[in-house]
Amino acid sequence: MGNNILFICGTLNQTTQMYSIARELQEHTCYFTPFYLEGFTAILHRMGLMENTAVGDKISKRVHQFLAEKNVLVDPGGKRDNYDLVVMCTDLLVQKNLRGKRLLLVQEGMTEPEGIRYAGVRLFGLPRYVANTATFGLSNAYHRFCVASPGYRDLFIRKGIPAEKLVVTGIPNFDNVASFLKNDFPHHGFVLAATSPTRETFQRDDREGFIRKVMEIANGRQVIFKLHPAEQEKRSRREIERLAPGALVFQDGNINEMIANCSVLVTQFSTVTYVGLALGKEVYSYLDLEELKRLMPIQNGGTSASHIADECRALLASPLPKPASELPRTGWFSGKIQSRWLQEPRLNGLGRA
């Protein structure tokens, strides 16, 4: 007899990763739930203040549609409560009904730079979601944490996460970027700008400056803007139409295929920067490209889901661990506040200059 496993979904990217892992565990009964809230965050959601997050109606609607198309078992909120293992795609909020169960955390993608809000979480105990993905992994509530690369393992250890919990498995969706080269996207040789929902998560965003920089980089070449699904589409389109007339704008579509066909990739704070770097594209980003090369998700031919499934089996076979405790607050700041000005592409193999 197999075990009952609950997969907690989030964005569509996180959901497809969870689905990939579940497909490798067909000897068990797998259930899925869209991400759910409790307490103060549930109140914010009812007030309509969480729309631009993974629990917002726009994103959750896509997740529900995906789960319906795959005809999987859905248990909203994990209410069955008889799960032998829970697989999570984020620990920025760990729901109370998950405590006391075997928990496995899977890295979704890039973690944000450690800025002022990260320092507030570490020093003063603010809720982890205040600093978004910069505090990914800091709950310590899980018993195993599957990460993208040795570089990320080192990063999480530096942040105080116990080394024995960390396993380098690679992460689905970013472990076989060469597969994106075969696609049906009709455009080629363009400059692709991938935006981030920084304003929607209450961060500073000089969007006008970003658009102008993209057009400067393009220097007359075709420009395509790929908006993040959580962005306010109408506002972003108005800005692009005013500052970049003639540019194409997509909010939907497979951005990985767009990257495969572009000549230049310009990003703000996006995991897809890794795709551009791995494919040898000329890349511009707010992020430190040297650091990204060190953190690059391992390319293992798309076998990360299988490796993560093996970690699930190992955790299921072990005695139920004791509940983990929160990481202690730090009296020091473990990272540096990183500059967010757009960097030029490096001349060291990270991208074509």
Image (cartoon, rainbow, N blue to C red):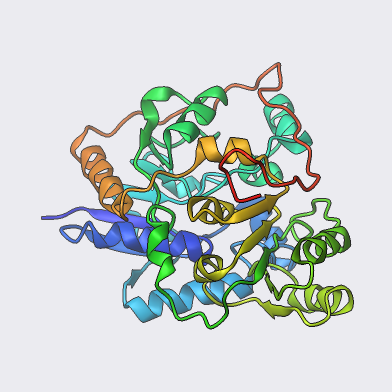
Image check: 57 left or right of 342? left
Question: Which quadrant of the view contains residue 329?
Answer: top right
Decide which of 268, 320 is in the foreground and name it.
Answer: 268
Is 321 above or below relative to 74? above
Any part of residue 351 in sight: yes
Q: Position of residue 63 (x, y in %)?
A: 49, 71
Is 6 above or below relative to 186? above
Q: Position of residue 227 (x, y in %)?
A: 68, 70
Image check: 18 left or right of 140? left
Decide which of 96, 300 is in the foreground and name it.
Answer: 300
Q: How many marks?
A: 0
Q: Residue at x 28, y 52 (%)?
A: 303
Q: Residue at x 65, y 43 (%)?
A: 112
Quadrant (top left, top right, bottom left, bottom right) of the N terminus = bottom left
Farthest residue toward the left? 1
Image check: 256 left or right of 74? right
Decide which of 80, 182 is in the foreground and name it.
Answer: 182
Question: Which quadrant of the view contains residue 179?
Answer: bottom left
Question: Which quadrant of the view contains residue 188?
Answer: bottom right
Q: Position of residue 28 (x, y in %)?
A: 19, 57
Farthest residue toward the top? 331
Q: Residue at x 61, y 36 (%)?
A: 290
Any part of residue 136 in sight: no
Q: Position of residue 259 (x, y in %)?
A: 55, 65
